[in-house]
Amino acid sequence: MTTQTRIATQPIPGQKPGTSGLRKKTRVFMQPGYLENFVQSIWDGIGGIAGKTLVVGGDGRFFNEAAIQTILKMAAASGAARVIVGQNGFLSTPAASNLIRVRGADGGVILSASHNPGGPDEDFGIKYNMSNGGPAPEGVTDAIFAATETIAHYDIQEGPDADLSVIGERPFGVMTLTVVDPVAEYAALMEKLFDFKAIRDLLKSGYQLRFDAMHAITGPYAVEILERRLGAAPGSVVNAVPSPDFGGGHPDPNPVWAKDLMDAMYAPDGPDFGAASDGDGDRNMIVGKGCYVTPSDSLAVLAANAQLAPGYASGLKGVARSMPTSCAVDRVAEARGMPCYATPTGWKFFGNLLDAGMATLCGEESAGTGSDHVREKDGLWAVLLWLNILAVKKQSVAEVMAEHWAEFGRTYYSRHDYEAIETGVANDLMAALRGSLGGLPGQAAGDLVVESAEDFSYTDPVDGSVASRQGVQIRFEGGARVVLRLSGTGTEGATLRVYLERFDPADFGQDPQGALAPVIKAVEALAGIAARTGRSGPDVIT
Ligand code: G16
């Protein structure tokens, strides 16, 4: 027996979605009414959910299932026709995007704080995705935020929780609840895109693979696809069981947080191919034997070789990268005669380009790569495309990189993060830099000279919407570039991201931090990071 109840509430300050939905400390989300206010504001911001079909799932982090139960009760109380949920509430972000698309859903609610740690004292997040499977664009997140500022009540169904452990369809209040296998439809899509036989043959030849699921959601996906369907040796997928606190770790696939994988890959008897993905399965890291591939280089290599996979055999319509991502992919696009777009940070900005058929492949320096197969970045997809390319080219990762740089030159790239800076200090630093931009061209900075300086603004070529103040971009004479912006995904203070790059057409063997030393010196001269923050160096270098 269920009853619908209307609960009076009032606005809770600070429910403004950031780069990717609303991310806060888990305990903030667990405060009475906090999640409920935001979920009701989603319903209100999108014009109601009566009669609609939604996909709901999350990365299994602490509070995942409890939040899903609340969302289901609120969906039922607001008259949703159907909610499709992954078994036990599990769905990777790309799998959720795929389900929205293949099931013709009106949208979806994804619960994750991505690569941020999970647990009662760590992070949680929620975002709304549209019927194309992609993150809501700013117009919609603005409407949701506006609803959080005027909310007066929310509707919820009283009664027992839904059983999410059994696959199948059953009534839940007035709506239909469909519990699905989280992996099946995603794995079927991967089989369509890639040459599984070629990858199987590669793996049969004694090729050694290690995939680190970082105790997060891709474990079950990777075991099914890499081990069961492609025949990688059992145990090739490590840390494969999702845990609510990611085994106490930080599920961020980069050389810092996936150090075990890096150590294994740089050992003399290490595997041939290594990869990792993040909390919700949309990010990836690629590393060959003794050869780490930066996300920006990975995007460039995939753009140059994607046609080797059946799903991309007819070529790419275009490519897109976020503005701070290195220009390595631009050089591929230019050589291959493809359009290349630079968007603000945030996967949501790729949606229109993909929907309009203007871009096929997209990627970001923050370890995200994807294509028009879904509307989210996709960690396992990137791993499979790499494996498909390696299987066809019959080369090691290091050989692929050497060949790539020989053809296109090498764009040395690194990101320096200064985490948990006091918000006022970070805002002052950015304001001072913004204020100085007009006078910078022609000015010396360390050993470099500024060529141009701008606060990046983007006009979407499809709908004409404008996103301004998306990060300071400074180019130097000779082709180096630096971008500074504040992260929109952190939950503590501010994180300053400094993105550094320098193109070298001929010398490919340098240490990236050494190659970038003049750019690092120049940005210090322009922004005064050490003096303003009191930090002697970045907290994380990727
Ligand atoms: C999200 C966005 C990405 C963005 C990343 C980092 O990824 O979808 O587009 O690059 O955050 O954003 P920021 O630099 O603002 O912290 P994810 O994997 O966290 O959902």
Image (cartoon, rainbow, N blue to C red):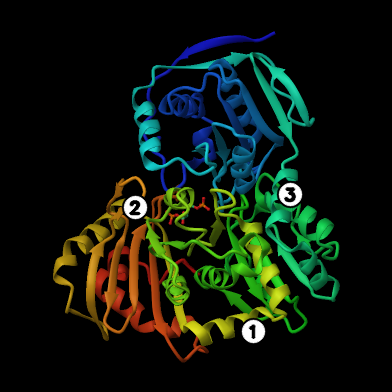
Instruction: Name the mark nearer the viewer: 1 or 2.
Output: 2
Relative side of 233 to 501, left or right? right
Residue shown at 56%/16% (left/top)?
A: 79
Relative side of 439 to 257, left or right? left
The CA span between labels 3 and 2 is 33 Å
Q: Residue furthest front?
A: 314
- Cβ of mark 1 under 8 A from ligand 1: no
| Mark 1 or 2, nearer chain start | 1
Q: Which residue is mark 1?
A: 399
- Between residues 422 and 53, which one lies in front from this camera angle? 53
What quarter of the picture does the N terminus occupy?
A: top right
Residue shown at 84%/63% (left/top)?
A: 231
- Between residues 526 and 98, which one lies in front from this camera angle? 98
Residue shown at 32%/63% (left/top)?
A: 533
Q: Can the viewer see residue 29 in this picture?
A: yes
**Helix, strand or loop under label 3:** helix
**Helix, strand or loop under label 1:** helix
Q: Position of residue 349 (x, y in %)?
A: 42, 51
Amino acid residing under circle 1: Glu
For mark 3, does the 10 Å Cα neighbourhood hold few (<14), some (14 to 19), or many (20 or more) residues? few
The CA span between labels 3 and 1 is 31 Å
